[in-house]
Amino acid sequence: MTPKKEWLEQLEKYKEKIACPVDLNTYFELPEIAGRKLEVIDIGKCDLPSGNVFVYDPFMYLGEESPSFFLTVPCGTYRVEICVIKPKEIYECARYAAVRLRFSDNRPIHFYEALTEKEQLDTLEQTTNATFFGFSVDCGMACILDKEVHLTFCNWLKQWKKEHPNANIVEDYFASLLEESYKMHPEFQRSFGDWLNWNIPDTEYHVPIFTSGFGDGYYPVYWGFDKNGEICQLVIHFIDIAQTFEEDAEEL
């Protein structure tokens, strides 16, 4: 469905309010920010057969009516990359600062929040600083999936619940898969698993699932636009590295 004209006019009016306050390119290009060493890992593919994209907590908020972003991307299969903040002390764990899909090799020059058309843009009138609408995480994990894949997931989940009426989808299904992911790829994961490239059973679809920054919270998603104004990336921003760690860096 095409967004209403009035909503698009508001979007243009408040465009700079939904611009990302940091350059997300640096998360995937620099070896270090604010004294914290970074590494980019590839966790496999994400299938987008329709080009309509969702980003949600996979275990709490996904329903059949969940809205996708109103902008679409070329259908295809894309690699999932995570910007990892490497642990500094033995008691620390790795943290996932951002996750991205690249739709082309072009470098973004602008990052604007990915919206669904359900947002009340006039609320931005009252804000003076950068803000975001984002998505909520209450199970410590997030995922990227396509609208067609999402419907396939919902159908699979209905059948799974029918066959396991007293089971919990996280504890009784995904927990063991996440632990297996850790065993196969232990670097930058905790023993219970911090990421999983899940193949929906009996389908060709892959859904990347991953830990969200510092856990539960509210996080923004951005489109990266290249010099031609074309979408070239999707980036989930979990941790503002400079804001979070620059005090520690100054003390060194």
Image (tube, grey):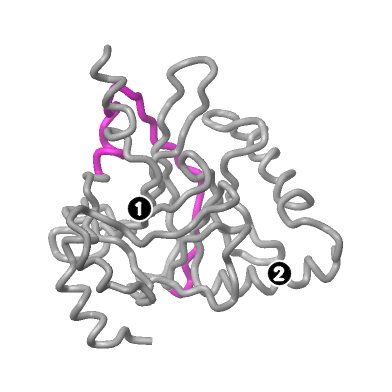
Tell me residue 77's x, y (percent). Answer: 45, 61
Q: Identify the residue shown where x is 31% and y is 20%.
A: 248
71 or 113: nearer the eye?
113
47 inside magenta stretch: yes
Quadrant where the C terminus sits is top left
Q: In this picture, which residue range is highlighted in magenta?
A: 25-50
32 or 185: nearer the eye?
32
Q: Identify the residue shown where x is 70% and y is 50%.
A: 174
- Residue lying at the far top of the rendered structure: 252
Mark 1 lies on a secondary structure that is: strand
The residue where tag 2 is placed is 156
Mark 2 lies on a secondary structure that is: helix
Quadrant where the N terminus sits is bottom left
241 or 51: nearer the eye?
241
Disc number at residue 235? 1
**Does residue 59 appear to the left or right of 119 in the view shown?**
right
Q: Identify the residue shown where x is 17% and y is 66%.
A: 229
Name the kind of residue labelled 1 in the image: Val
Where is 65 relative to 58, above or below?
below
